[in-house]
Image (cartoon, helix red, strand yellow):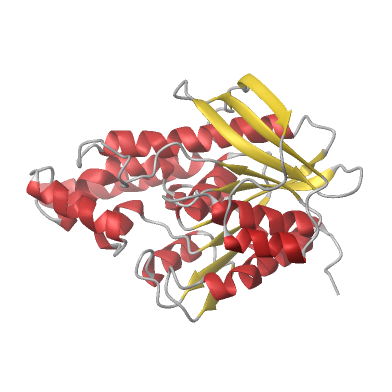
Amino acid sequence: MGCARSVLVASLGGVLLAIAAAAAPLPEPAPPLAGLSVVAEPTTIESHPLIAVYDLLKPKAQRAFRVEFAGMDGEVRTAHWQLPTGPGPHPTVVVFPIRAGNHVVSEALAKALVNRGYAAIWLERRVSLFGEDDHRAPGDFAAFAADLRNFVLDARSLIGWLATRPEVDPQRIATAGVSLGGILAATTLAQEPRASAGFFVMAGGGLPEILRDSQDGDVVRFREQGIEAHAFRDAEDLARLARPFTDPVDPLSWAERIEPDRVLLISARFDQVIAADRTRALWLALGRPRWLTVPTGHYQLVPYFWWAVGRGADHLDRVFGRALPD
C-alpha cells in the first residue's frame, strides 16, 4: 500500500510539473539595445565564390548597414542589415549563424531573402562553438548554454529595435537559420512574441542528444577531450550532465508555443551532424509542420542551398500573405 501510494504521489507530481511547465509565461522581454551604432556599409561582407557568383546574377540590396550593440555579456554584438528596393515597411527576417567557420551561409541566405523582397539582418557569432577559438573546459556546459541563451536574448533585443524602425513591418518579422542557426532561430521564434514565422534548415531538437551523437569533427573532438579530461565518462554521461543547462535554450522546451502552420523544416536525409531523429523530434514537438528533405548529408547540401532558401521564402510569403513569385 505504501509503495502504491508513493508511486501515485510521484505520478501526480510529474503531472503537476508538466502542467506548470506548459502554463509557464513567456520569458520576460529582452532589454533594449544598449550602445547602438548603425552605419552604412557595402552590400557584400564575406569574400567567397558563392557570394561573388550570386552578386553577378542577382540584384544587390538597395541599402546595407552595420549594426553594433552591447550584448547580454557586455561584449559588442554585430549584425548586418540589408534592405530591398522600395520604401517599405518591409517584412523582415533575422538570420542566425552556423556553429563555426565564416559567415558565408548567413550572408548568402540574407541576400536571397532580400532578392525576394524581404529585409534581412544576419548576426555574427563571436566564438566558433567547439572550434579552435573555444578555449573553455570540455565539461563547461553552463558556459555553452549561456552562449546560446545570450544569443537568443540579443536577437530578441534586436527584434525589439527592428520593430520600431519605419523600414520594418512589425507584424511580419520572422527568424531563419541553418544547422545551429536553425536551432537558435526556432528557440527565438518560440520565445519572442514580436516574431511570427520562421524556417529552419538542418535543425533539430534535443541539444544533449545532438552533443552525444553528432559526427561533426569539432563535436567528436569535444567528446573525446571531455572523456580524456574526466569531465564525463562517455557520451551518455555527457548528455545527462548537459541537459539541465541546455533545456532552457532547447527548442523542444518551447516548441508548443509555435503554431505549426507558421514554420517550415528542411533537412538533409543523410545528415550525420544533426541526425534525422533530432529533426523528427523537433517536427513532432512543433505539431508536425511542413517538412521537406533533400537527398544529401549535412555538408553536401550546397547544391540545394538556393532551392532550400527559395522554399523558405515561399513559406514566409504564404504566412505573411504575400504573392508568390511566378
Q: Is residue 233 left or right of residue 220?
A: left
Q: Quadrant of residue 193?
A: top right
Residue 220 in the image, given as x and y percentages of width and height:
23, 58
Who's the residue at 52% across and 48% down the image? 97
Who's the residue at 61% across and 48% down the image? 95
Q: Is residue 224 left or right of residue 51?
A: left
Who's the residue at 52% across and 55% down the image? 182
Please determine whether, in this image, residue 306 is positioned above or below residue 24. below
Who's the residue at 83% across and 68% down the image? 324
- Whether residue 1 is visible to the viewer of this picture, yes or no, is no
In this view, the residue farthest toward the right is: 87
Q: Quadrant of residue 58?
A: bottom right
Residue 17 in the image, given as x and y percentages of width and height:
36, 42
Which of the two residues, 64 or 179, is positioned nearer the viewer here?
A: 64
Please determine whether, in this image, residue 28 is positioned above or below residue 50. above
Please determine whether, in this image, residue 209 is positioned above or below residue 142. below
Pick the quarter of the image with the C terminus. bottom right
- Whether residue 226 is visible to the viewer of this picture, yes or no, is yes
Q: In this view, does 185 lie to the left or right of 136?
A: right
Which of the two residues, 174 or 220, is positioned nearer the viewer here?
A: 220
